[in-house]
Amino acid sequence: MIKNGSHHQAEADERRDGAGCGKPAGSVCSPEKRKRVVRLWCDGCYDMVHYGHSNQLRQAKAMGDYLIAGVHTDAEISKHKGPPVFTQEERYKMVRAIKWVDEIVEGAPYVTTLETLDKYNCDFCVHGDDITLTVDGKDTYDEVKREGRYRECKRTQGVSTTDLVGRMLLMTKAHHSNMDNPDYQQHTDNFGKGPKGHSPWTGVSQFLQTSQKIIQFASGKEPQPDDTIIYVAGAFDLFHIGHVDFLEMVYKQAERPYVIVGLHFDQEVNRYKGKNYPIMNIHERTLSVLACRYVSEVVIGAPYAVGQDLLDHFKVDLVCHGKTEVFPDKDGSDPYAEPRKRGVFRTIDSSNNLTTDDIVQRIIENRLLFEARNQKKEAKEMAVIEAMKKREPEHSDADS
């Protein structure tokens, strides 16, 4: 059970104390300087938004007060990287749903300039510690770096859009064939072992969950007496715009909603979804859901049947499910029998029928395009790494 919501008060205080005064975060500044709002800029493709993107935005927000996310158009991404999986409208909506984002700019330029920062009154831009290149191999942050208006945050190891596309391209392999094997490692199955992964930025590395990471994403609040506690359950695999639209509709079911999401363990998801699902393991799915602004709390490994104990424990007022099929429990029973009996079950129509299966089909249908995109991106990054290696001896000679 992981609580969600606003940041820790201490984190917010630290941000205010250190913001815009040239002192390290946590140092005390004059009251006048503390009042100044520090505005931050993050930009990117935000294609197949995952917890790596969310973690970048979380870290960026901790460096200031107001976070603007610039999202590139389909045309710009196609030109510099290859075709995006999601349309720009889908990507705009996904980024808006991340709880650390205060505002988004649609159609942000691919190369971050001082002009862009000044236009949106941003003090500096924040990016991960990997390299983003234009189609002609230039660092897209070169100008703002030279002017000292660039900050770096730590890239989340173990996930990238390239990695996720790779996982889906491997959907034909029997990832879950060892489900019944006692030696099967429940939460550490790396679905993306196919790509060569020479580049440290696009290469596949195993995501390792820590309690600290969950706390950073959760930092939550207790339900208040006037809140309506709403429970939803599912896989929420490859957290996407269909999930966001559903959760937004769930959130709108009450004046003061407190939305709890029950996430099923990997084996349970595989039981009812079959094939090689889930694509993301339980830990990855937990962070993805926690980053959503409509979610208040997550139950990790929720029981499939929404029974009496769960409803009473969380004092649930309403249980919601989308228009997707309700699969029976192992014994063939209806997992929502108890909430139906209590009269607290509600079917929600979000008017978005997108499923994880649909996304996989998008990738499979354009397999060659996406394989080429992955190879192109990795080749470009390897060229940068080689160039950086050649420059290292020059720097060491200059230092000596």
Image: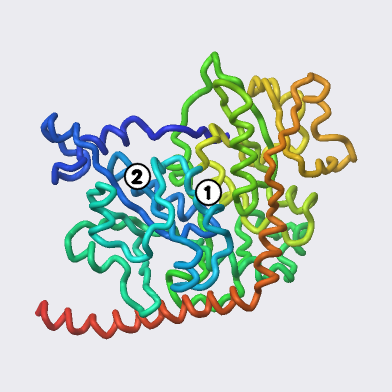
Q: Which residue is mark 1?
A: 94
Q: Measure how far apart labels 2 and 1 are at the Cα level.
A: 15 Å
Crowding near the residue tagged with mark 1, few <14, some 14–19, many ≥20 C-alpha atoms within 10 Å: many
6 relative position to 231: left or right? left
Q: Earlier in the sequence, mark 2 or mark 1?
A: 2
Q: Quadrant of the C terminus?
A: bottom left
Where residue 51 appears, as percent x and y from the top left, is 50, 52
Residue located at (44% from left, 75% from top): 199
Where residue 234 appears, as percent x and y from the top left, is 70, 42
- Here the colouring is rainbow
213 relative position to 233: left or right? left
Q: Amino acid at mark 1?
A: Met
Where residue 156 appears, as percent x and y from the top left, is 44, 57
Q: Amino acid at mark 2?
A: Leu
The relative height of residue 201 versus residue 68 in the rendered view (above or below) is below
291 relative position to 340: left or right? left
Disc number for residue 67: 2
The relative height of residue 345 versus residue 97 in the rendered view (above or below) is above
Where residue 112 appears, as percent x and y from the top left, is 31, 62
Residue 369, picture quadrant = bottom right
The answer to which of 3 and 340 lies nearer the viewer is: 340
- In terms of secondary structure, where does tag 2 sit? strand
Residue located at (52% from left, 47% from top): 93
